[in-house]
Image: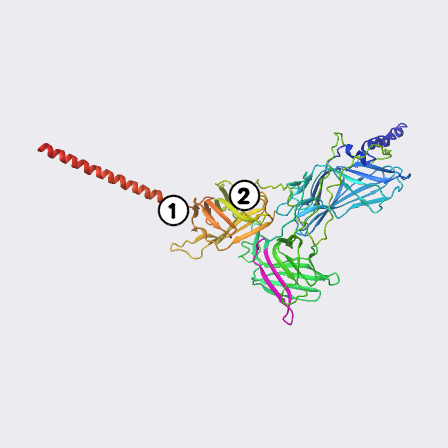
């Protein structure tokens, strides 16, 4: 029993020896530091109902090099790995408007200290890119970790602010993670300029701070390139996606006080009777009724349409009435059967309000805000707005027209400073040890060896103010999840799709081959055509009704979909059977560079519709069938080639097609061989008859000769 204390006394010594293996006292050792352990960290958010969802994921292997001043005024650097079992905290992006996400990693440092590392990520106002914006560290200069520290036990803080490390394109429709296995150094800035240099030395990192999949797995990565340059972004001059309405609100004496020009498409989620969730789609009509009120510091415009539908926006002045901003938006709608078929709660009125987003549309008073680019915003929990060609002036309207425009950043050309690559530092194949809290240690003094320099991480540039947006890096290599751009096969594949009703019975069948052709503009302003096929693996959703049915086919990671709306005629033929046809086709697509090479609007989201169609028509108790090519013009820039089509949106029995009504093209193609057959048959009969006649004449002639 008396020997136990002496045995226990060896433990601090053993720990100190281990720490000597981990600690470096000079940045010059950075090139020779062992590979640190790789840790995987997840920040989650707790929804109102259900289990927490991942909202920020990070895999990182890094060394932390902390410089400090000793009592003799010399400097030393303590280096240790970021432990893979660090504690995790952070703040996630709960709504799409939120533009920042943060992860906090903490671990023990010595016998009486802790180390905290904060990584804060930002994204631009239209949520097309994210980056590492701020890095902060906080630690205590405990003597057993920082021996002979001049400021022993003092708390030190260091930050890196307003940067754009890991600049990555990522959208809700096409999310990406950032991946880099090159050695990169981030140098911290202290409030005291005399404090020695401290760095975060990253050996490898993969991070996704926004739009994390529910599976918790990384989306396809954007990798750090060996050589990256940027070019100016061209102004966006795309055609309007939505009908553009021009609205004017007058004051009490009849003078215009609020001007608005905008196109809005509504995407509204609602629940079906079978508890599935679908979306209603509609546009803001140009003839919407205008209401609201104007004031010196607050102005509201309310647009009413249909019956019980509305869009309201409220603006206020700020900064001593020198500028204005959007402070709230609301959407009202009624789940009426035409737009919300088979709703679980039909006829109910819903009012969604959004008031807690960031400052938006900030504009100098006396000017108008202009943004032609596509923007999308969530309002409440069920509504997403796709806004195009927006110009608004809620204050200081003069001469019944918009004042000078303050254009949004994404409409303007912008040049980024060249982003240089970090120097790759090759690590030796040494074994990495995981650091635990350590007792008394000895710091190795700096040697006279030449210090190896690691280049600063990509020479990041300062972020612009919040009301501007960095232009996309056009020459950056984008790893897409869609196929590489190759010429589509001449024969698009035929897919077999079905929709089931609430009882699980097949109620809509579609066998179909589709090839899409979409015109677009390239960066050199020349026109080109993107061509892509409907894959056989497309996901089919929709609904079936007595007079209306719908089929949506979604593909390429939800970046593309096509919707066919079927209607049954109210008028019936003499046999009492109506006819069905496709009345509307809607297409959502994304200009991914793999399909639209050289596009000037990479990853731009597009929507087109045609509501005046009358195709794929057949008796309601039959299926429609057409093997011939059918060209469908959706808009002047979008067309579909359909072939090998058989569709039945009503009256499906036992999951099988009913008898088919063939298209006129197929009927015409069948008539040709029939006519040929008839002609050949007539010819054969004529030859046979001629043969018989000639034979009989010859026989008669021979008989007469014999009698003579």
Evaluate whether residue 349 shows in this view. no
Classed neighbour count for the residue bearing mark 2: other residues with Cα under 10 Å, few (<14), some (14–19), many (≥20): some
Classed neighbour count for the residue bearing mark 1: other residues with Cα under 10 Å, few (<14), some (14–19), many (≥20): few
- Mark 2 and 1 residues: CB-CB less than 8 Å, in contact? no
**Residue placed at 63% from the left, 67% from the top?**
400
Q: CA distance from mark 2 to mark 1?
A: 30 Å
**Residue placed at 38% from the left, 44% from the top?**
669
In this rendering, which labeled residue sits more in front, label 2 or label 1? 1
Asked if the stretch drawn in magenta spans residue 250, the answer is yes
Evaluate whether residue 414 shows in this view. yes
The residue identified by callout 1 is 667
Residue sitting farthest toward the bottom: 253
Quarter placement of the N terminus: top right
User: In the depicted view, which residue is nearer to us: 36 or 446?
Assistant: 446
Which quarter of the picture shows residue 706?
A: top left
Which element carries disc 1, helix, strand or loop?
Answer: helix
Asked if the stretch drawn in magenta spans residue 47, the answer is no
Q: Which residues are magenta?
A: 238-265
Please tell me which of labels 2 and 1 falls first in the chain: 2
The x and y percentages for residue 166 are: 70, 43
The x and y percentages for residue 546 are: 48, 53
The x and y percentages for residue 692 are: 20, 37
**Residue placed at 35% from the left, 45% from the top?**
671
Which quarter of the picture shows residue 428?
A: top right
Quarter placement of the C terminus: top left
User: In the depicted view, which residue is nearer to us: 250 or 32?
Assistant: 32
Label total for image: 2
The x and y percentages for residue 160 are: 77, 45
Q: How is the image coloured?
A: rainbow
Q: Which mark is residue 625?
A: none
The residue identified by callout 2 is 538
Which element carries disc 2, helix, strand or loop?
Answer: loop
């Amino acid at each position: 029993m008396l020997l136990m204390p002496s045995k226990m006394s060896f433990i601090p010594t053993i720990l100190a020896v281990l720490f000597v293996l981990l600690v470096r006292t000079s940045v010059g050792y950075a090139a020779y530091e062992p590979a640190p352990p790789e840790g995987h960290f997840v920040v989650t958010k707790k929804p109102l109902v259900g289990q927490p969802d991942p909202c920020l994921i990070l895999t990182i292997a890094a060394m932390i090099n902390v410089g400090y001043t000793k009592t003799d005024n010399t400097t030393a650097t303590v280096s240790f790995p970021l432990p893979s079992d660090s504690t995790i905290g952070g703040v996630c992006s709960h709504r799409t408007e939120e533009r920042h996400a943060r992860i906090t990693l903490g671990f023990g440092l010595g016998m009486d200290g802790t180390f905290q590392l904060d990584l804060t990520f930002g994204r631009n106002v239209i949520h097309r890119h994210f980056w590492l914006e701020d890095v902060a560290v906080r630690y205590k200069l405990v003597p057993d970790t920082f021996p002979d520290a001049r400021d022993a036990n003092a708390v030190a803080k260091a930050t890196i602010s307003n940067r754009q490390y890991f600049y990555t394109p990522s959208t809700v429709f096409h999310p990406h993670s950032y991946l880099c296995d090159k050695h990169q150094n981030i140098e911290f800035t202290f409030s005291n300029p005399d404090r020695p240099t401290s760095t975060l030395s990253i050996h490898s990192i993969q991070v996704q701070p926004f739009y994390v999949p529910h599976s918790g797995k990384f989306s396809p990565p954007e990798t750090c390139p060996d050589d990256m340059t940027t070019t100016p972004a061209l102004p966006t001059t795309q055609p309007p996606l939505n009908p553009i309405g021009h609205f004017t609100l007058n004051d009490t004496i009849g003078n215009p006080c609020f001007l608005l020009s905008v196109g809005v498409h509504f995407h509204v989620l609602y629940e079906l009777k079978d508890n599935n969730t679908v979306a209603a789609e509609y546009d803001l009509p140009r003839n919407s009724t205008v209401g609201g009120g104007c004031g010196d510091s607050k102005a509201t415009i309310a647009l009413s349409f249909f019956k019980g539908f509305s869009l309201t926006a409220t603006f206020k002045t700020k900064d001593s009435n020198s500028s204005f901003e959007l402070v709230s938006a609301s959407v009202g709608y009624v789940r009426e059967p035409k737009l919300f078929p088979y709703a679980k709660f039909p006829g109910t009125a819903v009012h969604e309000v959004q008031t807690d987003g960031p400052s938006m549309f900030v504009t100098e008073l006396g000017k108008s805000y202009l943004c032609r680019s596509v923007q999308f915003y969530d309002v409440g929990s069920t509504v997403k707005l796709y806004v195009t060609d927006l110009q608004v002036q809620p204050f200081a309207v003069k001469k019944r027209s918009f004042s000078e425009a303050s254009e949004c950043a994404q409409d303007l050309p912008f040049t980024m400073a060249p982003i240089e690559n970090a120097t790759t530092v090759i690590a030796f194949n040494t074994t990495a040890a995981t650091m635990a809290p350590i007792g008394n240690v000895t710091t190795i003094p700096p040697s006279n060896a030449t210090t190896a320099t690691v280049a600063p991480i990509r020479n990041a540039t300062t972020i612009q103010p919040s009301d501007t947006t960095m232009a996309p890096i056009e020459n950056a290599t984008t790893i897409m999840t869609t196929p590489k751009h190759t010429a589509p096969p001449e024969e698009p594949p035929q897919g077999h799709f079905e929709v089931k009703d609430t009882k699980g019975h097949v109620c809509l069948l579609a066998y179909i081959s589709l090839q899409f052709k979409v015109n677009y503009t390239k960066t050199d302003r020349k026109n080109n055509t993107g061509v892509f096929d409907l894959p056989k693996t497309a996901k089919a959703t929709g609904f079936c009704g007595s007079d209306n049915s719908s089929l949506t086919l979604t593909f390429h990671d939800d970046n593309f979909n096509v919707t066919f709306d079927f209607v049954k005629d109210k008028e019936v033929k003499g046999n009492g059977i109506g006819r069905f046809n496709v009345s509307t086709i809607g297409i959502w697509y994304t200009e991914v560079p793999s399909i639209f090479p050289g596009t000037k609007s990479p990853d731009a989201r597009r929507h087109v519709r045609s509501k005046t169609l009358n195709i794929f028509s057949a008796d309601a108790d039959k299926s429609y069938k057409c093997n011939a090519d059918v060209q469908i013009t959706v808009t002047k820039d979008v067309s579909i080639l359909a072939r090998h089509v058989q569709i039945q949106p009503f009256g499906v029995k036992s999951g099988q097609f009913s008898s088919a009504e063939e298209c006129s093209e197929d009927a015409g193609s069948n008539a040709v061989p029939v006519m040929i057959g008839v002609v050949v048959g007539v010819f054969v009969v004529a030859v046979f008859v001629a043969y018989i006649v000639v034979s009989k004449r010859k026989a008669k002639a021979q008989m007469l000769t014999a009698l003579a």
